[in-house]
Each structure stands twice: as structure tokens, then as C-alpha cells.
Image (tube, rainbow, N blue to C red):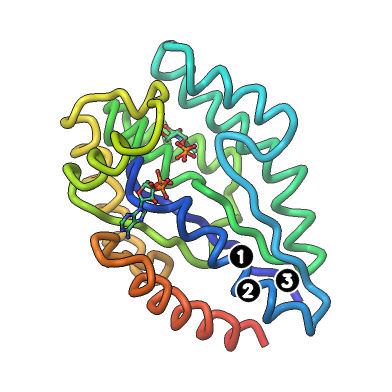
Amino acid sequence: MRGKFISFEGIDGAGKSTHIRYVADYLQQRLQAYDHQVICSREPGGTPLGEQLRDILLKQSMHLETEALLMFAVRREHIAQVIQPALERGDWVISDRFTDASFAYQGGGRHLSLDKLNQLEQWVHPDLQPDITFLFDVPLEVARARLDATRELDKFEQEKAQFFADTRNEYLRRAAQFPQRFRIIDSTRSIPEIQQELAVILDLLLQQAE
Ligand SMILES: Nc1ncnc2c1ncn2[C@@H]1O[C@H](COP(=O)(O)OP(=O)(O)O)[C@@H](O)[C@H]1O
Ligand SMILES: Cc1cn([C@H]2C[C@H](O)[C@@H](COP(=O)(O)OP(=O)(O)O)O2)c(=O)[nH]c1=O
């Protein structure tokens, strides 16, 4: 049995990282019986080379197309080294961001043509898509307040409100374009309420995998 591939998306501060551990533990408990593992990974990153490139991508400014190409270079390595082998073993993969983030940030936020992004996607993973994508959605002010309360901001997180408005809109546009794959999670609710909703969706996914 092929494993399932789950991606987590949302603008910075939406609450994505908060829920990844919950989802991973929830699935791991239920997959143990089948001897399958849950692999948690992230983009940019996920491999030794990808983590080195992450450091550069999150700190240095560069030409927009260089940024997009590097995101997809990281992804190529991540798919080859981590995602594809895990799915073939029957393991489940949770990725903190995947290609929707390139469409949202480089396409929506920075206005790189969606046509170029589509070409990169066709090149790097013509036959692979997440089975399900959780889009953690909050108004910009909520995300900003959460970020300001907690951490030092990286290159992307220091962008202006318009950047995040455009990024969020592109995420929502993609969610409308691919409704079978996306689950929009209203992340203004409390953490336990969100976990309840996630559990219902995960139970369905587990049923489908049986
Ligand atoms: N539903 C929520 N309600 C209140 N605070 C939240 C909620 N979800 C996340 N947070 C808090 O907001 C901050 C940013 O969340 P995080 O999960 O790191 O966001 P992301 O990974 O999407 O950037 C953290 O301090 C987290 O505890
Ligand atoms: C995967 C990916 C991420 N990004 C950006 C979005 C985020 O601001 C940043 C990585 O952030 P993220 O994984 O959210 O890290 P953290 O939770 O530690 O802040 O990279 C892109 O611009 N394009 C991409 O294709």
C-alpha cells in the first residue's frame, strides 16, 4: 500500500507548526498497527542540502527567479531523498509546506508569473501531489499579532501587509481551484477546536487508506 502525503500551508503565524505535531502523533498511533511510520519534514529543507539552502533562502535577498528556482531545487532533492522513498515503503509523509507555498509566496506575494511556476511544477513533480493539503487560514492582523508575540522574524516574515494579503489570496485561490485536495482550516478558533476538526478529517483519510 502506498503511504499518504499531507502538506501544511498558510501565511506565517497562521498556526501551521502548532498543529503538525498533533497530526503526526494522531496518525502514528493509528498506523503503528500496520507497521507504517509517519515522516515529518519541511520545505525549504527536508534534506541536508535542503537545510543548507533554507538557511540562505530565509536570510539573503536575491532575484525573484533565483528564489523560485532554489525553492524547486530544494523540492527536487526532498522528493528524491525523502518523500518518494517513504511513500513507496508505505509510510506517511507530512510536509510543512510544499509547492502551494511557491505559488502563494513567489507567485502571489512577489508576483512571479504563475505560468513559470506551473512549468517548474511540471518539471519537478509532474505526477506527485499531496493527498491532502491543510490550509491554515487567518486574517493578516491575527497572524501578525501571533508572530510579533513569539519570535524573531526571518526574511519572509518581515514583508509588508500587502505581501501577506497577496500570499493569502493566492492560497485561497488555489484552494478553490483544487477543492478535493484542500481543507481550509479556520485558524482563528481555539487550538482544541481545530484539533477536533483535524481528527475528523484524518479519520476519513485513514479509512480511505485501509
Ligand atoms: N489557534 C490558535 N490560537 C491562539 N494562538 C495560536 C493558535 N495557533 C497558533 N497559535 C500561536 O501563534 C504562534 C504562531 O503559531 P505557529 O504554529 O508557529 O505558526 P506558523 O507555523 O503557521 O507560522 C505560536 O505562538 C502559537 O502558539
Ligand atoms: C516552501 C516555500 C517556503 N517559502 C517561505 C514561506 C515561509 O515564510 C518560509 C519558511 O517558513 P516556515 O516553514 O513557515 O518556517 P517557520 O515556521 O520556521 O517560520 O519560506 C516560500 O516563499 N516559497 C516556498 O516554496
* Numbered disc in front, either 3 or 1: 1
> Quick one: label 2, few (<14), some, or many (20+) residues within 10 Å?
some
Amino acid type, callout 1 = Ala
Q: Which of marks 3 and 1 is nearer the N terminus?
A: 3
Q: What element carries label 1?
A: helix
Of the pair 127 and 80, the residue shown nearer to us: 80
Label 1 residue near ligand 1, CB within 8 Å: no
Q: In this view, does 12 lie above or below 128?
A: above
Indicate left or right for 26 with 8 as reference. Answer: right
> Quick one: label 3, few (<14), some, or many (20+) residues within 10 Å?
few
Q: Is residue 77 above or below residue 92?
A: above
Q: Residue at x 46, y 55 (%)?
A: 18
The picture quadrant where one finds residue 194 is bottom left
Residue 59, x across and y down, in percent = 48, 16
Q: In this view, does 14 lie above or below 73?
A: below
Q: Which residue is drawn at 21% across and 25% down?
A: 160
Amino acid type, callout 3 = Arg
Q: Which residue is drawn at 32% across and 65% down?
A: 185
Quadrant into which the C terminus falls: bottom right
Spatial CA distance of label 3 from label 1 is 17 Å
Spatial CA distance of label 1 from label 2 is 5 Å
Residue 136, x across and y down, in percent = 34, 57
Residue 192, x across and y down, in percent = 38, 72
Residue 27: assigned label? 2
Spatial CA distance of label 2 from label 3 is 15 Å
Residue 24: assigned label? 1
The picture quadrant where one finds residue 186 is bottom left
